[in-house]
Amino acid sequence: MIFKIINDNQIILEDVHDFDLEQTFNCGQCFRWNKITENLFVGVVFERVVRISIEKNKIIFTGRDVAHEFDLIWRDYFDLNINYYKIKKNLSLIDPTLKIACKYAPGIRILKQDFWETLCSFIISQNNNIPRIKCIIERLCVNFGQEIEPNFFSFPSSSVIAKLNQADLAPIKCGFRDSYILDAAQKISSREICPKKLKSEDINTARAELMKIKGVGPKVAECTLLYGLHRLEAFPVDVWMKRALDAFFPGKNASYFGPYAGIAQQYIFHYSRMNPTLVK
């Protein structure tokens, strides 16, 4: 991978492998990236607005101080230090169907997202579809976040949300999830649940800790572990994944896929969702 700094606010990545923006942003792991044109995405991450465009084999990052912060933020956020080619090669040896799934969307990467934003977002995601999830999150940010650029708002901190009540959350139209969001914010802001501790604990213990939050079940806990804490052994199972496991991997669970089960899950999830007739 070759890095070229154009100026403080722009950097170009060349010779990038195993990284596809659309596959990564549209595989169900994040909700604040939007496709503006065929080759342009805009996202709000860690209180920063960044625009990423594609030109042939180049990925161009544009945003305030993006060149200075690339190694501090963006390299880690996009998991560019991990060799996904090697991981896919090893996963492909486990099972022939997994090999097909790896080849189907080879550019997916697990983003290293903010823990609180991930937890809150997946609480909102319960019994919801992606367009509506994104709208609720956007209303949450507009109402309680800080304006970073015109019409772009930060994700509000847990301490800000913890001071609110259900009536305060009415404008975001999140329905029954309002009490879940408040309970999560209170437990995170008070440090009753500590992300640093969850990062290092045995995954079963970490999962159980997250499930102490009102409304957080196994799926939300697992998504938070994988996308918010980069616990790559975490293995979220929703309706699509249950169907895929029943169809392709009967009797198997996360342990079958090894230490990178979370990455395997993304390939399987995307493959099954894009080929629904295979998992009926």
Image (cartoon, rainbow, N blue to C red):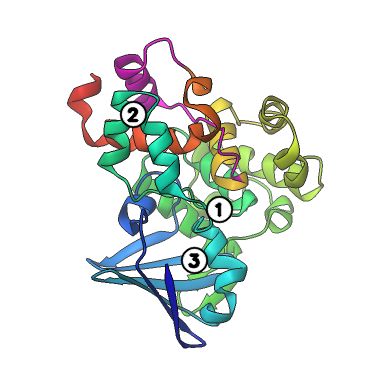
Mark 3 nearby-residue class (10 Å; few <14, some 14–19, many ≥20): some
Residue picked out by circle 1: 112
Work out whether residue 128 can be spotted.
Answer: no
- Where is residue 232 drawn, in percent x and y? 55, 38
| Residue type at the position of mark 1 | Lys
Work out whether residue 255 can be spotted.
Answer: yes
Residue picked out by circle 2: 98
N-terminal-most mark, 1 or 2: 2
Q: Are marks 3 and 2 in contact (CB under 8 Å)?
A: no
N-terminal-most mark, 3 or 2: 3
Residue picked out by circle 3: 44
| Residue type at the position of mark 3 | Val
- At mark 1, the secondary structure is loop
Choose top left, top right, bottom left or bottom right for residue 238. Answer: top left
Mark 2 nearby-residue class (10 Å; few <14, some 14–19, many ≥20): many
- Please tell me whether residue 236 belongs to the stretch shown in magenta: yes
- At mark 2, the secondary structure is helix
- Please tell me whether residue 104 belongs to the stretch shown in magenta: no
- Where is residue 201 drawn, in percent x and y? 75, 34
Q: Is residue 179 left or right of residue 140?
A: right
In the displayed structure, would residue 180 be above or below residue 168?
above
Residue at 40% over, 25% down: 94
Kindly report which numbered mark, 1 or 3, lies closer to the viewer in this rendering.
1
| Residue type at the position of mark 2 | Leu
Kindly report which numbered mark, 3 or 2, lies closer to the viewer in this rendering.
2
N-terminal-most mark, 1 or 3: 3
Q: Which residues are magenta?
A: 230-252
Q: Quadrant of the C terminus?
A: top left
Q: Are marks 1 and 2 in contact (CB under 8 Å)?
A: no
Residue at 56% over, 53% down: 113
